[in-house]
Amino acid sequence: MRQFPLEMHDMAPGRVVEWRLRSTAGAADADCPDDAAGRRASFNQDKHFTVAEESRGADDPVASWIAVTFEVAGALDEQALTRALLAFVRRHEVLRCEFRRLAGELACEPIAVGELALDVVPVAAFDSSADLRGFLLERFKRSIDTLSWPLFTMGVVLREDSATVYLAFDHIVCDGLSMPIVVHEVQSAYEALRRGEDIDLPPAPSYLDFAEEQRHRYLSIDADDERLGYWKSFIARSGGAFFPRFPLELGVEPDRMYPIVNEASSLLDAAEAEVFEKACRAVDGKPFMGVLAAVAVCLREAGGPGVYRGFMPVSERGRGGWANSVGWFVNTMPIEFDASPGRDFAQVMAAVRAGFGEMVQHIDVPFVRAWELLAPAEFAARSWPYPVNFFSYIDVRKCPGAERHQDWRPTSHVWSARANGACSWFQRDADGLHMNSLYVDTAAARGTMDAFQEALRHTVREIARYGSFRRPVALASPRRPVDTPLDAHPYARRS
Protein backbone atom coordinates (compact mmCIF):
# COMPACT_ATOMS: atom_id res chain seq x y z
CA MET A 1 0.00 0.00 0.00
CA ARG A 2 1.64 3.14 -1.21
CA GLN A 3 0.93 6.85 -0.73
CA PHE A 4 1.21 9.07 -3.80
CA PRO A 5 -0.74 11.88 -5.50
CA LEU A 6 -4.12 10.90 -6.88
CA GLU A 7 -3.03 12.46 -10.17
CA MET A 8 -0.51 9.60 -10.51
CA HIS A 9 -3.07 6.81 -10.02
CA ASP A 10 -3.55 5.11 -13.38
CA MET A 11 -6.91 3.50 -12.56
CA ALA A 12 -9.03 2.27 -15.44
CA PRO A 13 -12.12 4.34 -16.35
CA GLY A 14 -15.69 3.23 -15.87
CA ARG A 15 -19.09 4.16 -14.49
CA VAL A 16 -19.05 6.05 -11.17
CA VAL A 17 -21.62 5.39 -8.47
CA GLU A 18 -21.59 7.04 -5.03
CA TRP A 19 -23.16 6.32 -1.65
CA ARG A 20 -24.60 9.40 0.05
CA LEU A 21 -24.88 9.12 3.82
CA ARG A 22 -27.87 10.66 5.59
CA SER A 23 -29.63 10.63 8.92
CA THR A 24 -33.19 9.36 8.92
CA ALA A 25 -33.94 11.45 12.04
CA GLY A 26 -34.09 14.67 10.04
CA ALA A 27 -32.47 17.94 11.01
CA ALA A 28 -30.60 18.00 14.32
CA ASP A 29 -32.01 20.00 17.20
CA ALA A 30 -30.56 23.44 17.78
CA ASP A 31 -29.29 22.34 21.18
CA CYS A 32 -27.15 19.26 21.77
CA PRO A 33 -28.93 16.56 23.75
CA ASP A 34 -27.72 15.84 27.27
CA ASP A 35 -25.83 12.68 26.31
CA ALA A 36 -23.98 14.50 23.52
CA ALA A 37 -22.90 17.26 25.89
CA GLY A 38 -20.52 14.79 27.51
CA ARG A 39 -18.70 14.04 24.24
CA ARG A 40 -15.85 16.39 23.47
CA ALA A 41 -13.50 16.53 20.52
CA SER A 42 -9.83 15.65 20.90
CA PHE A 43 -7.17 18.35 21.00
CA ASN A 44 -6.24 17.55 17.38
CA GLN A 45 -9.86 17.84 16.27
CA ASP A 46 -10.49 21.07 18.17
CA LYS A 47 -7.50 22.82 16.63
CA HIS A 48 -8.33 21.52 13.15
CA PHE A 49 -11.96 22.69 13.42
CA THR A 50 -10.93 26.07 14.84
CA VAL A 51 -8.58 26.71 11.92
CA ALA A 52 -11.39 25.84 9.50
CA GLU A 53 -13.77 28.22 11.29
CA GLU A 54 -11.30 31.08 11.34
CA SER A 55 -10.16 30.66 7.77
CA ARG A 56 -13.76 30.48 6.57
CA GLY A 57 -14.57 33.67 8.49
CA ALA A 58 -11.59 35.40 6.86
CA ASP A 59 -12.61 34.17 3.40
CA ASP A 60 -9.33 32.25 3.31
CA PRO A 61 -10.46 28.62 3.48
CA VAL A 62 -8.02 25.88 4.46
CA ALA A 63 -8.76 22.65 2.61
CA SER A 64 -7.28 19.13 2.69
CA TRP A 65 -8.30 15.49 2.50
CA ILE A 66 -7.00 11.94 2.94
CA ALA A 67 -8.23 9.32 0.47
CA VAL A 68 -7.92 5.60 -0.14
CA THR A 69 -8.74 3.38 -3.11
CA PHE A 70 -8.79 -0.39 -3.50
CA GLU A 71 -9.77 -2.97 -6.11
CA VAL A 72 -12.58 -5.51 -6.11
CA ALA A 73 -12.12 -8.36 -8.58
CA GLY A 74 -15.02 -9.62 -10.68
CA ALA A 75 -18.46 -8.15 -11.20
CA LEU A 76 -19.38 -6.03 -8.18
CA ASP A 77 -22.21 -7.08 -5.87
CA GLU A 78 -23.52 -3.56 -5.20
CA GLN A 79 -25.92 -4.69 -2.48
CA ALA A 80 -23.13 -6.44 -0.56
CA LEU A 81 -20.83 -3.43 -0.85
CA THR A 82 -23.61 -1.09 0.30
CA ARG A 83 -24.13 -3.22 3.40
CA ALA A 84 -20.37 -3.40 4.01
CA LEU A 85 -19.97 0.37 3.81
CA LEU A 86 -22.94 1.01 6.07
CA ALA A 87 -21.57 -1.47 8.62
CA PHE A 88 -18.20 0.30 8.46
CA VAL A 89 -19.73 3.71 9.19
CA ARG A 90 -21.87 2.32 12.00
CA ARG A 91 -18.86 0.58 13.55
CA HIS A 92 -16.76 3.75 13.97
CA GLU A 93 -18.48 6.38 16.08
CA VAL A 94 -16.23 9.22 14.91
CA LEU A 95 -17.59 8.83 11.36
CA ARG A 96 -21.11 9.41 12.64
CA CYS A 97 -20.22 12.65 14.45
CA GLU A 98 -21.39 16.15 13.78
CA PHE A 99 -19.12 18.78 15.33
CA ARG A 100 -20.41 21.98 16.88
CA ARG A 101 -19.38 24.62 19.39
CA LEU A 102 -20.80 24.11 22.86
CA ALA A 103 -19.93 26.65 25.55
CA GLY A 104 -16.72 27.47 23.70
CA GLU A 105 -15.59 23.85 23.35
CA LEU A 106 -15.99 21.59 20.35
CA ALA A 107 -18.65 18.97 20.99
CA CYS A 108 -19.17 15.72 19.08
CA GLU A 109 -22.78 14.69 18.52
CA PRO A 110 -22.88 11.10 17.23
CA ILE A 111 -25.82 10.13 15.06
CA ALA A 112 -27.44 6.95 16.33
CA VAL A 113 -26.53 3.77 14.46
CA GLY A 114 -30.16 3.04 13.65
CA GLU A 115 -30.67 6.50 12.13
CA LEU A 116 -28.08 6.10 9.38
CA ALA A 117 -28.93 5.27 5.77
CA LEU A 118 -27.03 5.13 2.48
CA ASP A 119 -28.49 6.26 -0.81
CA VAL A 120 -26.95 4.86 -3.99
CA VAL A 121 -26.51 7.65 -6.56
CA PRO A 122 -25.32 7.11 -10.17
CA VAL A 123 -22.93 9.95 -11.04
CA ALA A 124 -21.28 9.69 -14.48
CA ALA A 125 -19.37 7.47 -16.88
CA PHE A 126 -15.78 8.14 -17.97
CA ASP A 127 -13.92 6.90 -21.02
CA SER A 128 -10.41 7.91 -19.95
CA SER A 129 -8.30 7.63 -16.82
CA ALA A 130 -7.39 11.32 -17.03
CA ASP A 131 -11.03 12.43 -17.00
CA LEU A 132 -11.78 10.08 -14.12
CA ARG A 133 -8.89 11.42 -12.04
CA GLY A 134 -9.97 14.97 -12.77
CA PHE A 135 -13.49 14.19 -11.59
CA LEU A 136 -12.30 12.57 -8.36
CA LEU A 137 -9.96 15.43 -7.53
CA GLU A 138 -12.75 17.97 -7.93
CA ARG A 139 -15.24 15.72 -6.13
CA PHE A 140 -13.02 15.36 -3.08
CA LYS A 141 -12.22 19.08 -2.97
CA ARG A 142 -15.87 20.07 -3.16
CA SER A 143 -17.39 17.40 -0.91
CA ILE A 144 -14.94 17.36 2.02
CA ASP A 145 -15.75 20.25 4.35
CA THR A 146 -14.55 20.30 7.98
CA LEU A 147 -17.59 22.36 9.00
CA SER A 148 -20.24 20.15 7.39
CA TRP A 149 -21.39 16.56 7.93
CA PRO A 150 -20.80 14.00 6.53
CA LEU A 151 -17.05 14.40 6.70
CA PHE A 152 -16.23 11.85 4.03
CA THR A 153 -17.41 10.61 0.66
CA MET A 154 -17.70 7.07 -0.74
CA GLY A 155 -17.97 5.76 -4.27
CA VAL A 156 -16.95 3.14 -6.80
CA VAL A 157 -15.76 3.00 -10.40
CA LEU A 158 -17.66 0.11 -12.01
CA ARG A 159 -16.49 -2.07 -14.90
CA GLU A 160 -17.71 -5.39 -16.22
CA ASP A 161 -15.00 -7.46 -14.54
CA SER A 162 -13.68 -5.23 -11.74
CA ALA A 163 -14.31 -2.16 -9.61
CA THR A 164 -12.26 0.49 -7.81
CA VAL A 165 -13.73 1.63 -4.50
CA TYR A 166 -12.78 5.06 -3.16
CA LEU A 167 -13.29 6.83 0.14
CA ALA A 168 -12.04 10.34 0.99
CA PHE A 169 -12.05 11.84 4.49
CA ASP A 170 -11.50 15.08 6.30
CA HIS A 171 -8.51 14.75 8.64
CA ILE A 172 -10.79 15.49 11.61
CA VAL A 173 -12.11 11.90 11.55
CA CYS A 174 -9.04 9.89 10.60
CA ASP A 175 -5.28 9.68 10.11
CA GLY A 176 -2.94 7.94 7.68
CA LEU A 177 -2.98 4.65 9.59
CA SER A 178 -6.78 4.63 9.38
CA MET A 179 -6.54 4.01 5.63
CA PRO A 180 -5.35 0.37 5.84
CA ILE A 181 -8.07 -0.21 8.45
CA VAL A 182 -10.70 1.14 6.03
CA VAL A 183 -9.53 -1.22 3.28
CA HIS A 184 -9.31 -4.25 5.55
CA GLU A 185 -12.75 -3.77 7.13
CA VAL A 186 -14.72 -2.91 4.00
CA GLN A 187 -13.13 -5.68 1.96
CA SER A 188 -13.49 -8.28 4.72
CA ALA A 189 -17.12 -7.34 5.29
CA TYR A 190 -17.87 -7.35 1.56
CA GLU A 191 -16.31 -10.77 1.05
CA ALA A 192 -18.14 -12.22 4.07
CA LEU A 193 -21.49 -10.87 2.90
CA ARG A 194 -20.96 -12.26 -0.59
CA ARG A 195 -20.39 -15.68 0.97
CA GLY A 196 -23.62 -15.30 2.95
CA GLU A 197 -21.75 -15.03 6.26
CA ASP A 198 -21.97 -12.54 9.11
CA ILE A 199 -19.35 -9.79 9.38
CA ASP A 200 -16.73 -10.86 11.90
CA LEU A 201 -14.20 -8.19 12.89
CA PRO A 202 -12.15 -7.62 16.07
CA PRO A 203 -13.27 -4.96 18.57
CA ALA A 204 -12.72 -1.32 17.60
CA PRO A 205 -13.18 1.03 20.59
CA SER A 206 -14.50 4.50 19.79
CA TYR A 207 -12.07 7.32 19.10
CA LEU A 208 -14.41 9.53 21.11
CA ASP A 209 -13.50 7.51 24.21
CA PHE A 210 -9.83 8.09 23.44
CA ALA A 211 -10.47 11.83 23.05
CA GLU A 212 -12.42 11.97 26.31
CA GLU A 213 -9.65 10.21 28.20
CA GLN A 214 -7.01 12.49 26.68
CA ARG A 215 -8.89 15.67 27.60
CA HIS A 216 -9.53 14.43 31.12
CA ARG A 217 -5.80 13.91 31.65
CA TYR A 218 -4.42 17.04 30.00
CA LEU A 219 -7.03 19.80 29.81
CA SER A 220 -6.16 21.11 33.29
CA ILE A 221 -2.36 21.20 32.97
CA ASP A 222 -0.54 24.54 32.79
CA ALA A 223 2.82 25.68 31.42
CA ASP A 224 4.55 24.79 34.69
CA ASP A 225 3.52 21.14 34.59
CA GLU A 226 6.54 18.86 34.91
CA ARG A 227 5.24 16.69 32.06
CA LEU A 228 6.22 19.48 29.66
CA GLY A 229 9.87 19.18 30.66
CA TYR A 230 10.90 17.32 27.49
CA TRP A 231 9.31 19.98 25.30
CA LYS A 232 10.94 22.79 27.29
CA SER A 233 14.40 21.28 27.03
CA PHE A 234 13.95 20.78 23.28
CA ILE A 235 12.85 24.41 22.89
CA ALA A 236 15.79 25.66 24.95
CA ARG A 237 18.30 23.79 22.79
CA SER A 238 16.53 25.13 19.68
CA GLY A 239 17.18 28.72 20.65
CA GLY A 240 13.70 29.26 22.07
CA ALA A 241 11.80 28.04 18.98
CA PHE A 242 8.87 25.69 19.52
CA PHE A 243 8.89 24.62 15.85
CA PRO A 244 12.08 23.06 14.41
CA ARG A 245 12.83 24.89 11.19
CA PHE A 246 13.35 23.05 7.90
CA PRO A 247 17.01 23.83 7.32
CA LEU A 248 17.11 24.19 3.51
CA GLU A 249 16.05 27.08 1.29
CA LEU A 250 12.47 26.93 0.00
CA GLY A 251 12.10 30.52 -1.18
CA VAL A 252 9.10 31.38 1.00
CA GLU A 253 8.13 34.76 2.43
CA PRO A 254 6.96 35.18 6.05
CA ASP A 255 3.20 34.94 6.69
CA ARG A 256 2.43 33.72 3.18
CA MET A 257 0.87 30.46 2.01
CA TYR A 258 1.63 28.91 -1.37
CA PRO A 259 0.13 26.37 -3.77
CA ILE A 260 1.79 23.00 -3.35
CA VAL A 261 3.74 20.44 -5.32
CA ASN A 262 2.66 16.89 -4.50
CA GLU A 263 5.01 14.21 -5.81
CA ALA A 264 6.18 10.70 -5.04
CA SER A 265 8.84 8.22 -6.08
CA SER A 266 10.48 4.99 -4.98
CA LEU A 267 13.79 5.03 -3.10
CA LEU A 268 14.47 1.29 -2.84
CA ASP A 269 12.95 -1.74 -4.53
CA ALA A 270 11.87 -4.79 -2.52
CA ALA A 271 15.27 -6.51 -2.60
CA GLU A 272 17.14 -3.31 -1.75
CA ALA A 273 14.77 -2.58 1.12
CA GLU A 274 15.45 -6.02 2.60
CA VAL A 275 19.21 -5.44 2.44
CA PHE A 276 18.76 -1.94 3.86
CA GLU A 277 16.86 -3.42 6.82
CA LYS A 278 19.65 -5.92 7.44
CA ALA A 279 22.19 -3.08 7.43
CA CYS A 280 20.09 -1.23 10.02
CA ARG A 281 19.69 -4.33 12.20
CA ALA A 282 23.45 -4.92 12.05
CA VAL A 283 24.01 -1.68 13.98
CA ASP A 284 21.11 -2.30 16.42
CA GLY A 285 18.67 -0.05 14.61
CA LYS A 286 15.32 -0.32 12.87
CA PRO A 287 14.60 0.57 9.25
CA PHE A 288 12.76 3.80 10.11
CA MET A 289 15.79 4.86 12.15
CA GLY A 290 18.02 4.19 9.17
CA VAL A 291 15.84 6.35 6.91
CA LEU A 292 15.82 9.13 9.51
CA ALA A 293 19.60 8.89 9.83
CA ALA A 294 19.92 9.18 6.05
CA VAL A 295 17.57 12.19 6.00
CA ALA A 296 19.64 13.92 8.70
CA VAL A 297 22.92 13.33 6.85
CA CYS A 298 21.47 14.58 3.55
CA LEU A 299 20.14 17.73 5.20
CA ARG A 300 23.50 18.31 6.84
CA GLU A 301 25.39 17.81 3.57
CA ALA A 302 23.09 20.36 1.92
CA GLY A 303 24.00 22.98 4.50
CA GLY A 304 21.82 22.06 7.46
CA PRO A 305 23.07 21.74 11.05
CA GLY A 306 24.97 18.79 12.47
CA VAL A 307 22.30 18.28 15.11
CA TYR A 308 19.03 17.10 13.57
CA ARG A 309 15.88 18.62 15.07
CA GLY A 310 12.45 17.85 13.67
CA PHE A 311 8.87 16.81 14.30
CA MET A 312 7.84 13.18 14.05
CA PRO A 313 4.22 11.93 14.13
CA VAL A 314 3.83 8.91 16.41
CA SER A 315 0.79 6.63 16.49
CA GLU A 316 -1.01 6.31 19.82
CA ARG A 317 -3.05 3.27 18.81
CA GLY A 318 -0.84 0.70 20.48
CA ARG A 319 -1.10 2.11 23.97
CA GLY A 320 -4.76 1.37 24.64
CA GLY A 321 -6.20 -1.30 22.39
CA TRP A 322 -7.06 1.08 19.52
CA ALA A 323 -5.31 -0.96 16.79
CA ASN A 324 -8.53 -1.47 14.79
CA SER A 325 -10.10 1.95 15.39
CA VAL A 326 -10.54 4.78 12.89
CA GLY A 327 -9.62 8.22 14.20
CA TRP A 328 -6.84 10.77 14.56
CA PHE A 329 -4.54 8.74 16.83
CA VAL A 330 -1.42 10.78 16.12
CA ASN A 331 0.77 12.73 18.48
CA THR A 332 3.44 14.96 16.95
CA MET A 333 6.66 14.96 18.94
CA PRO A 334 10.06 16.68 18.66
CA ILE A 335 13.15 14.55 18.16
CA GLU A 336 16.81 15.52 18.07
CA PHE A 337 20.12 13.69 17.63
CA ASP A 338 23.70 14.29 16.57
CA ALA A 339 24.48 13.68 12.88
CA SER A 340 27.56 15.89 12.71
CA PRO A 341 30.33 15.38 10.14
CA GLY A 342 32.73 12.55 10.78
CA ARG A 343 30.16 10.22 12.33
CA ASP A 344 29.70 6.90 10.60
CA PHE A 345 26.41 5.08 10.07
CA ALA A 346 26.63 3.12 13.33
CA GLN A 347 27.28 6.29 15.33
CA VAL A 348 24.43 8.24 13.75
CA MET A 349 22.10 5.26 14.23
CA ALA A 350 23.07 5.09 17.90
CA ALA A 351 22.18 8.77 18.21
CA VAL A 352 18.84 8.24 16.44
CA ARG A 353 18.06 5.29 18.70
CA ALA A 354 18.85 7.33 21.82
CA GLY A 355 16.87 10.34 20.59
CA PHE A 356 13.86 8.20 19.72
CA GLY A 357 14.05 6.39 23.06
CA GLU A 358 14.03 9.69 24.90
CA MET A 359 11.11 10.97 22.80
CA VAL A 360 8.82 7.99 23.40
CA GLN A 361 9.18 8.35 27.16
CA HIS A 362 7.27 11.64 26.87
CA ILE A 363 4.72 10.76 24.21
CA ASP A 364 1.69 11.17 26.47
CA VAL A 365 1.57 14.98 26.33
CA PRO A 366 -0.61 15.96 23.32
CA PHE A 367 1.18 18.12 20.75
CA VAL A 368 -1.67 20.62 20.47
CA ARG A 369 -1.74 21.09 24.24
CA ALA A 370 2.03 21.67 24.38
CA TRP A 371 1.73 24.11 21.48
CA GLU A 372 -1.05 26.06 23.20
CA LEU A 373 0.81 26.30 26.52
CA LEU A 374 4.38 26.87 25.35
CA ALA A 375 3.86 28.93 22.18
CA PRO A 376 0.52 30.73 22.68
CA ALA A 377 1.19 33.49 20.14
CA GLU A 378 1.95 30.96 17.41
CA PHE A 379 -0.97 28.79 18.53
CA ALA A 380 -3.35 31.63 17.65
CA ALA A 381 -2.23 31.51 14.01
CA ARG A 382 -3.93 29.37 11.36
CA SER A 383 -0.74 27.63 10.26
CA TRP A 384 2.74 26.73 11.43
CA PRO A 385 4.81 29.95 11.39
CA TYR A 386 7.50 28.89 8.90
CA PRO A 387 8.76 25.76 7.09
CA VAL A 388 9.04 23.02 9.70
CA ASN A 389 11.26 19.94 9.61
CA PHE A 390 8.89 16.93 9.50
CA PHE A 391 9.51 13.19 9.10
CA SER A 392 6.91 10.40 8.93
CA TYR A 393 7.42 6.68 8.35
CA ILE A 394 4.89 3.83 8.09
CA ASP A 395 5.55 0.15 7.48
CA VAL A 396 2.23 -0.84 5.93
CA ARG A 397 3.24 -4.51 5.96
CA LYS A 398 2.35 -4.45 9.66
CA CYS A 399 -1.14 -2.96 9.17
CA PRO A 400 -4.39 -4.96 9.34
CA GLY A 401 -5.05 -6.80 6.09
CA ALA A 402 -1.52 -6.36 4.70
CA GLU A 403 -1.39 -10.03 3.70
CA ARG A 404 -4.17 -9.29 1.15
CA HIS A 405 -2.73 -6.08 -0.31
CA GLN A 406 -1.57 -7.79 -3.50
CA ASP A 407 -5.19 -8.85 -4.11
CA TRP A 408 -6.83 -5.59 -3.01
CA ARG A 409 -4.17 -3.24 -4.42
CA PRO A 410 -4.87 -0.38 -2.01
CA THR A 411 -3.44 3.12 -2.48
CA SER A 412 -3.59 6.19 -0.25
CA HIS A 413 -3.49 9.85 -1.22
CA VAL A 414 -3.17 13.15 0.64
CA TRP A 415 -3.98 16.60 -0.67
CA SER A 416 -3.79 20.12 0.70
CA ALA A 417 -4.68 23.37 -0.99
CA ARG A 418 -1.75 25.43 0.30
CA ALA A 419 1.28 25.29 2.56
CA ASN A 420 4.28 27.32 3.68
CA GLY A 421 6.87 24.54 3.94
CA ALA A 422 7.60 20.91 3.15
CA CYS A 423 6.42 17.56 4.56
CA SER A 424 7.66 14.11 3.57
CA TRP A 425 6.07 10.73 4.27
CA PHE A 426 7.97 7.46 3.85
CA GLN A 427 6.23 4.11 3.34
CA ARG A 428 7.63 0.60 3.37
CA ASP A 429 5.53 -2.02 1.60
CA ALA A 430 6.09 -5.35 -0.11
CA ASP A 431 7.54 -3.55 -3.14
CA GLY A 432 10.13 -1.42 -1.35
CA LEU A 433 10.63 2.00 0.25
CA HIS A 434 8.76 4.99 -1.12
CA MET A 435 8.56 8.74 -0.52
CA ASN A 436 5.69 11.23 -0.91
CA SER A 437 6.40 14.93 -0.43
CA LEU A 438 4.17 18.00 -0.32
CA TYR A 439 5.99 21.33 -0.53
CA VAL A 440 5.54 24.92 -1.62
CA ASP A 441 5.48 25.54 -5.35
CA THR A 442 8.43 27.91 -5.68
CA ALA A 443 11.46 27.67 -7.93
CA ALA A 444 13.75 27.42 -4.90
CA ALA A 445 11.69 24.66 -3.31
CA ARG A 446 11.53 22.63 -6.51
CA GLY A 447 15.30 22.75 -6.85
CA THR A 448 15.90 22.02 -3.18
CA MET A 449 13.48 19.09 -2.98
CA ASP A 450 14.67 17.55 -6.26
CA ALA A 451 18.25 17.62 -5.01
CA PHE A 452 17.28 16.36 -1.57
CA GLN A 453 15.30 13.44 -2.97
CA GLU A 454 18.14 12.39 -5.26
CA ALA A 455 20.67 12.67 -2.44
CA LEU A 456 18.45 10.61 -0.16
CA ARG A 457 17.97 7.89 -2.79
CA HIS A 458 21.74 7.74 -3.24
CA THR A 459 22.34 7.58 0.53
CA VAL A 460 19.88 4.78 1.35
CA ARG A 461 21.23 2.74 -1.55
CA GLU A 462 24.78 3.28 -0.28
CA ILE A 463 23.67 1.99 3.13
CA ALA A 464 22.05 -1.04 1.51
CA ARG A 465 25.16 -1.81 -0.57
CA TYR A 466 27.92 -1.06 1.91
CA GLY A 467 26.27 -0.91 5.34
CA SER A 468 27.42 2.68 5.88
CA PHE A 469 27.53 6.19 4.45
CA ARG A 470 30.01 6.67 1.65
CA ARG A 471 30.76 9.63 -0.58
CA PRO A 472 27.84 12.13 -0.50
CA VAL A 473 26.05 12.69 -3.77
CA ALA A 474 26.23 16.12 -5.39
CA LEU A 475 23.01 17.89 -4.43
CA ALA A 476 21.70 18.59 -7.90
CA SER A 477 19.41 16.62 -10.18
CA PRO A 478 17.30 17.12 -13.31
CA ARG A 479 13.65 17.99 -12.90
CA ARG A 480 11.19 15.09 -13.08
CA PRO A 481 7.68 16.11 -14.21
CA VAL A 482 5.27 16.06 -11.29
CA ASP A 483 2.51 14.31 -13.22
CA THR A 484 4.66 11.46 -14.54
CA PRO A 485 3.16 8.11 -13.43
CA LEU A 486 5.27 5.94 -11.17
CA ASP A 487 7.43 3.56 -13.17
CA ALA A 488 6.22 -0.03 -13.03
CA HIS A 489 3.56 0.87 -10.49
CA PRO A 490 2.27 -2.54 -9.35
CA TYR A 491 -1.29 -1.27 -8.90
CA ALA A 492 -1.59 0.46 -12.27
CA ARG A 493 -4.40 -0.44 -14.63
CA ARG A 494 -4.25 0.74 -18.23
CA SER A 495 -7.29 2.23 -19.91
Image (cartoon, grey):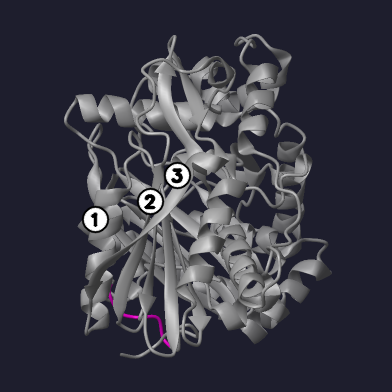
Residue 125 visible in rendering: yes
Mark 1 sits on what residue? 441
Mark 3 and mark 2 residues within 8 Å of each other at the beta carbon:
yes
Rendered residue at 23%/59% (across/down): 138
Rendered residue at 37%/85% (across/down): 159
Q: Is residue 430 above or below residue 344?
A: below
The one of 245 and 85 positioned closer to us in this rendering = 85
Residue type (three-letter) at the residue carrying disc 2: Trp
Mark 2 sits on what residue? 65
Is 184 placed left or right of 21 in the picture? right
- x%, y% of residue 201? 72, 59
Q: CA distance from mark 2 to mark 1?
A: 19 Å
At numbered mark 2, what does the secondary structure look like: helix, strand or loop?
strand
Residue type (three-letter) at the residue carrying disc 3: His
- Secondary structure predominantly adopted by residues drawn in magenta: loop
Q: Which residues are magenta?
A: 483-487
Query: In the picture, residue 26 is in which quadrant?
Result: top left
Which of the marked residues, 3 or 2, is nearer the chain's N terminus?
2
> How packed is label 2: few (under 14 Cα within 10 Å), some, or many (20 or more)?
many
Q: CA distance from mark 3 to mark 2?
A: 6 Å
- x%, y% of residue 91? 62, 48
- x%, y% of residue 223? 60, 11
The one of 480 and 218 positioned closer to us in this rendering = 218
Query: In the picture, residue 262 is in which quadrant?
Result: bottom left
